[in-house]
Image: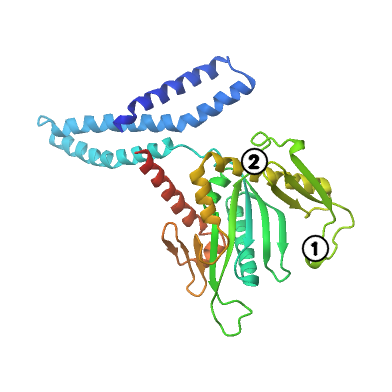
């Protein structure tokens, strides 16, 4: 970590400068909040640097004792034991610091808009889409996140053609963003008399929720159409023009909302989804590589494109990006074991970033 030494010195100096500024009362209002956030972000890094440097100094002192023939034999034995422990701790502290120094995705702390759509496989794909929706709802509950359904187009037999939900909480996007892609299911449908295994697919897209400060949408750039809400099969569920369709003219992005009886509420939901989609489009422009990756992950919903397979006959879930298979299908679908897959994906992502940085 010698190459990082100057950077560590600068981090500590900045941390001390921020502490002094905030203590002096020189900053106030928005400036105070900005400096306080920077200090909070720097504090764990500075604590890590100080812990590493203390461990390195302690290790050098212990090694000096063990190398000194004049030292008491019992003292040398104790020093040797402590030195072995520190030799294991120092690389762990270094690795932790390297991970903390990786560039952060600005959207990681945000809430998310989660979109699920049935892909290839007809009714079975729609039923699987409903399974995924329940899985994420349970996963959100386990993490203490708020799970708000914004739009659901159901098939009337327990499946969904499409669902859009707002998952709200700290660090939601950081954990859910790796769920974007094609999810494949292999099982015997309830309607299959011969017991033959079918393969179906559903697509998941996870977008960081954008605030108004992230995306400024001008009134002149949108067209709003209102129409009468309708249920499955064209059945009227509302006698007023409460459904809303918003078209963002510069990008061509179209969002419709009809779940609420109030036109005002449908418009607010549609604007939230529209902001998220525009924000994601802007992020993709800034990061062409990520855009290509997301497109390849989400794909068209065809069976052959997949990031994860849920095999019911064998009770297993396989994530093809990290070659990880868990024989815990029920627990994954209950949201309980999903973190095992997410943690593996985060670790793989961090390892790739570390390799690029080195």
For this rendering, which residue is in front, 292 or 188? 292
Mark 2 nearby-residue class (10 Å; few <14, some 14–19, many ≥20) = many
Q: Describe the element under mark 2 as helix, strand or loop.
A: loop
Which residue in the rendered view is the most extreme toward the left? 69
Q: Which residue is mark 1?
A: 231
Find residue 106 and report its horizontal and vertical position in percent: 54, 37
- Occupied quadrant, residue 59: top left
Can you say whether 90 is above or below 112 in the image?
above
Find residue 61 and report its horizontal and vertical position in percent: 22, 29
Which residue in the rendered view is the most extreme toward the right? 239
> Along the polypeptide, which appears first: circle 1 or circle 2?
2
| Residue name at image x 58 percent, y 42 percent | 170
Q: Describe the element under mark 1 as helix, strand or loop.
A: loop
Q: Quadrant of the N terminus?
A: top left
Mark 1 nearby-residue class (10 Å; few <14, some 14–19, many ≥20) = few
| Residue name at image x 59 percent, y 51 percent | 206
Instruction: Say left or right for 34 vs 73.
Output: right
Can you say whether 276 is above or below 150 in the image?
above
Which residue in the rendered view is the most extreme toward the bottom? 194
Circles 1 and 2, Cβ within 8 Å, touching? The answer is: no
Q: Which residue is mark 2?
A: 210
User: Residue 312 bears which disc, if any?
Assistant: none
- Occupied quadrant, residue 264: top right
Find residue 172 and report its horizontal and vertical position in percent: 58, 46
For this rendering, which residue is in front, 38 or 61? 38
Q: Quadrant of the C terminus?
A: top left
Find residue 344 and report its horizontal and vertical position in percent: 44, 53
| Residue name at image x 16 percent, y 34 percent | 66
Can you say whether 175 is above or below 133 in the image?
above
Mark 1–mark 2 distance (CA, rounded to whole Å): 29 Å
């Amino acid at each position: 970590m010698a190459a990082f030494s100057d950077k560590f010195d600068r981090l500590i100096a900045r941390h001390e400068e921020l502490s002094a500024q905030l203590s002096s009362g020189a900053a106030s209002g928005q400036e105070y909040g900005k400096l306080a956030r920077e200090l909070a972000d720097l504090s764990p890094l500075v604590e890590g640097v100080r812990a590493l440097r203390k461990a390195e100094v302690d290790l050098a002192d212990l090694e000096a004792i063990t190398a000194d023939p004049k030292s008491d034999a019992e003292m040398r034995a104790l020093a040797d034991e402590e030195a072995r422990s520190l030799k294991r701790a120092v690389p762990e502290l270094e690795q932790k610091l390297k991970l903390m120094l990786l560039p952060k995705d600005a959207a990681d702390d945000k809430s998310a808009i989660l979109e699920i759509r049935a892909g290839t496989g007809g009714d079975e794909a729609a039923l699987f889409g409903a399974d995924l929706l329940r899985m994420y709802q349970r996963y959100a509950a386990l993490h203490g996140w708020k799970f708000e359904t914004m739009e659901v187009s159901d098939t009337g037999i327990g499946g969904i053609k499409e669902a859009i939900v707002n998952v709200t909480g700290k660090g939601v996007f950081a954990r859910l963003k790796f769920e974007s892609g094609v999810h494949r299911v292999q099982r015997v449908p309830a309607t299959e008399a011969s017991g033959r295994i079918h393969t179906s697919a559903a697509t998941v897209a996870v977008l960081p929720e954008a605030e108004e400060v992230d995306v400024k949408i001008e009134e002149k750039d949108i067209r709003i159409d209102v129409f009468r809400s309708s249920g499955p099969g064209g059945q009227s569920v509302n006698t007023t023009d409460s459904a809303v369709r918003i078209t963002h003219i510069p990008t061509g992005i179209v969002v419709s909302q009809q779940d609420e009886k109030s036109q005002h509420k449908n418009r607010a939901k549609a604007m939230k989804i529209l902001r998220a989609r525009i924000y994601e489009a802007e992020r993709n422009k800034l990061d062409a590589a990520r855009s290509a990756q997301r497109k390849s992950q989400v794909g068209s919903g065809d069976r052959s494109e997949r990031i994860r397979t849920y095999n019911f006959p064998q009770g297993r879930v396989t994530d093809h990006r990290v070659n990880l298979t868990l024989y815990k299908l029920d627990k994954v679908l209950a949201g309980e074991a999903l973190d095992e897959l997410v943690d593996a994906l985060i670790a793989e992502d961090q390892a790739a970033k570390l390799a690029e940085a080195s």
